[in-house]
Image (cartoon, rainbow, N blue to C red):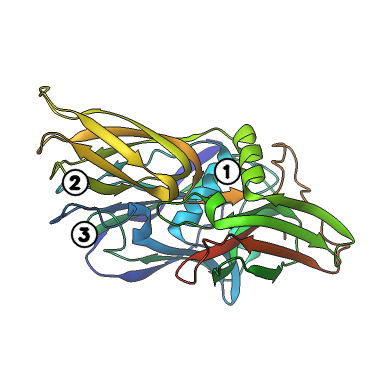
Amino acid sequence: MDYRLATLWPRAQYTADKTEVIDIDIIDPISRIVITAEPDNNGSGADATAHPAKCVSKIEIVDGSDVLYSLTGQEAQGVDFYDRDKVPPSILNYLQGNYSEMIFNINFGRFLFDPELAFDPSKFRNPQLKITLDINGGGDESDDVYLTVLAHLFDEKSASPMGFIMSKEVKDYANGASSHEYTDLPLDFPYKQLFLRSQVYGSGPEAIIDTVKLSQDVDRKIPLNHTMYQILRNMIHEWNPYDEWILVATNTTTGEYYFCTPCYWPNFAGAQWRAAAQQQGVAFYEGDGGRFKHSNSAVNCNVTALAKGWAPHGLVPLLPRLREDNREGYQVGNIKNLKLDVLTTASGASTQATQIISQQFRRY
């Protein structure tokens, strides 16, 4: 068989926060690692706690002190969407006693089983996958999480990858009102993509970030200098919308907050999730920033909602989308300084945060 799906960590239950360290002790090159986290729901109040993806607070791949991948669960889901232009088969299930299913794909190639770009464990001394679980970080008062890790491997198909795609959070900083944040970006490897993430419930990224500027060698060349409105409009043309279905309960007729993945102009459609229809009306509103309100004229009527929008978890790509056969990316080898200048709007506040994520082609 050319390829195979291997188990790195069998499905296990956790009832307390933990960082699970998994040795990557296989020999075959890995094209994709698939992490599945299943947080449960034990809601005692009206509003959900947070997006279920927040039950995974950090995902890392390390080789000693060398960090090869480092993202939060929400960042990992956003990056995966832009990698594949596909929504993973995650299930947002906020029903009492049910479990959500959160998929976190780590893509090492431009596509599944890319022969030129894959993670080759033999190139490292002791590669490890570290997954940090925050049991009650998301879902609706979750108190246990199931974790499973699988890997798509090259089997009998010969592959000698020249490198892999490396994704990392470069910076996490507090916002300020109408303030500039200057960041010197790494220049060690060419870029596949550069992301900016600023997620605030009730506000899309364009309401938090005013202008983004990318400068080479002190403005000798300026590859990017646009408002977030302009960047988002361009992004919408290059990637598909992010759509997902969500199961929500109706505990009160006054409205309840739930969480979705798209943060820019999400819209909703819904239907009753029950064996027999009952007379009632359902409404959805808000949604920017990844939190929406659901109200119903009748209690004890579960509803399925279809959410569709852009900027999953507030993540926005800043560089042009590459063709699938491109393995060169944005070359920075001859640049002495690459600086990102992010200007927030007057709505920016120190209670908010912005993250900068790099995605680079790393050679062995």
User: Which residue lies under the disc numbered 3?
Assistant: 141
Q: Are marks 2 and 3 in contact (CB under 8 Å)?
A: no
- Closest to the camera, between mark 2 and mark 3, is 3
Secondary structure beneath dot 2 equals: loop
Q: In the depicted view, which residue is nearer to us: 72 or 60?
A: 72
Three-letter code for the amino acid on which mark 3 is drawn: Glu
**Mark 1 closeness class: few <14, some 14–19, many ≥20 residues within 10 Å:** many
Q: Distance between the residues labelled 1 and 2?
A: 29 Å
Left or right: 193 in relation to 316: right
Give how far across and how far down residue 25 sits, in percent. Answer: 50, 62
User: Which residue lies under the disc numbered 2?
Assistant: 98
Give the mark, 2 or 3, whose residue is nearer the N terminus: 2
Give how far across and how far down residue 51 sits, in percent. Answer: 34, 53
Residue at 59%, 56% in the rendered image: 209
Three-letter code for the amino acid on which mark 1 is drawn: Tyr
Q: Is residue 96 above or below residue 233?
A: below
Give the mark, 1 or 3, whose residue is nearer the N terminus: 1
Secondary structure beneath dot 3 equals: loop
Which residue is most to the front?
Answer: 346
Q: In which quarter of the image is the C terminus?
A: bottom right
Q: Distance between the residues labelled 2 and 3?
A: 12 Å
Three-letter code for the amino acid on which mark 2 is drawn: Asn
User: Which residue lies under the disc numbered 1?
Assistant: 82
